[in-house]
Amino acid sequence: MYRIAFNILLAVSLFYLPWWAGALIVLSGCFLVDAFFEAILFAMVADAFYGTGFGFHGFAHVATLYSAIVLGVASVIRTRLAW
Amino acid sequence: MTYLKRSKRPGRGRATTAFVVGGLVFVFALTYLFPSFFPSVFFPVGSLFWRAEQSTVGFFVSMGKIVQSKYSLVEENKRLTEELAARDRAALMLDDVRTENETFKSMLGRTGKGNYVLGVILVRPPVSLYDTLVIDVGTKDGVAAGDKVYAEGDVLVGDIAEAYGSQSKVALYSVPGRKTPILVGTSTVATDATGRGGGNFIFTLPAQTKLAEGAVITMPSIRNHIFGVVQRIMVDSTDSVQTVLFRSPANVNQLRFVEVDRTLR
């Protein structure tokens, strides 16, 4: 249930919400949903949608990097905690 | 009874994980090697949602205005009428000067007149992380990568980064880290400005160069335009340079339309 809800939220945030709202959804989704790989997929699409050759200080995959790091950290923390 | 912790329960298996990771690597490779693949597929779909959003927001804004008190509307109408009359007087002079300027340029075989197309902004910051806009004109309207984009008439805000069928991506000059050649003030000192996002820029000049807050920044171009206005000058007495902060007079968060100049080709 959580997975579907977070996927819908991410899809909406891609089109309508400020980038920081998407970042918060990814953060919470990675902790609440098991193996939330969709976060990286959405981040890649966001980078492709809005990114240009100029990137962000020259780096064009900020959202992908962010979601990969959050997913990695969340996976490690989830193996040590139970809720 | 002993329950396993959720994290200790058997997972989906390595094969599934490898498949998912492989899929993500494939998608990343796709976006890296063919950056225009996703935008060209999803922009037509996205523009439907963005247009629907604009209609919905427009409806609620109209409803909000309807419930405003009549008194405040009358007061606002009076104030705006006076403001409009004052601006009309100023515009008459401006039109005269502009016509004279164009005449001089024509006499010298040059012209600042462009071939413009109006674009509606579909997406703007902060939805876009990279300080980019998505507008509703594309290659079908004669727009191509590199075309200059103006806002509010004469404010140069960016250029077309990628053009698709009916949509284009505009890279604002204020993209964080983007360097843009500029001319500073009436002395037209040439230097490079670095974007800081949200229409803000920074550059440095030798401390001896005289510059005042409010000075106009332009770009080397035959067309009359404004690129930015100096907001703050920071000079350290121990340093030989001054750091200047300036911003674009057009607020991209409030814009609805931009003009794309197609005269480059």
Image (spheres, coloured by chain):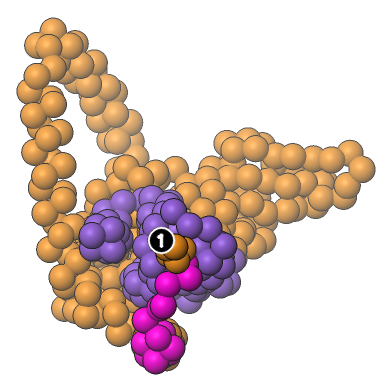
Chain colours: A purple, B orange
Please state the horizontal and vertical placement of residue A79, each as a whole percent of the image.
Answer: 53, 66
Q: Nearer the viewer, residue B258 or B69?
A: B69
Q: Residue at x 67, y 54 (%)?
A: B203
Residue at the far front: name it. B1
Q: Nearer the viewer, residue A18 or B226?
A: A18
| Residue B116, above or below B243 | below
Which quarter of the figure has residue A47? bottom left
User: Which secondary structure lies at badge 1?
Assistant: loop
Please state the horizontal and vertical placement of residue B200, each as a whole percent of the image.
Answer: 54, 49
Which quarter of the figure has residue B229? top right
Specify the principal SS of the magenta part: helix
Quarter of the image containing the C terminus of chain B?
A: bottom left
Determine if residue B220 is in view. no
Residue at the far top: name it. B71
| Residue A7, above or below B155 | below
Please state the horizontal and vertical placement of residue B249, each as a whole percent of the image.
Answer: 44, 43
Determine if residue A6 is in view. yes
Please state the horizontal and vertical placement of residue A33, each as a whole percent of the image.
Answer: 37, 62
Q: Amino acid at mark 1?
A: Met
Left/right placement of residue B263 relative to residue A43 reads: left
Q: Residue at x 43, y 88 (%)?
A: B14
Q: State yes or no: residue A2 in magenta.
A: no
Quarter of the image containing the N terminus of chain B?
A: bottom left
Q: Which residue is mark 1?
A: B1
* Magenta extent: B7-19
Q: Residue at x 34, y 40 (%)?
A: B94
Q: Nearer the viewer, residue B178 or A11?
A: A11
Q: Residues within 10 Å of mark 1 (few under 14, many from 20)?
A: few
Task: Name the subunit of mark 1.
Answer: B
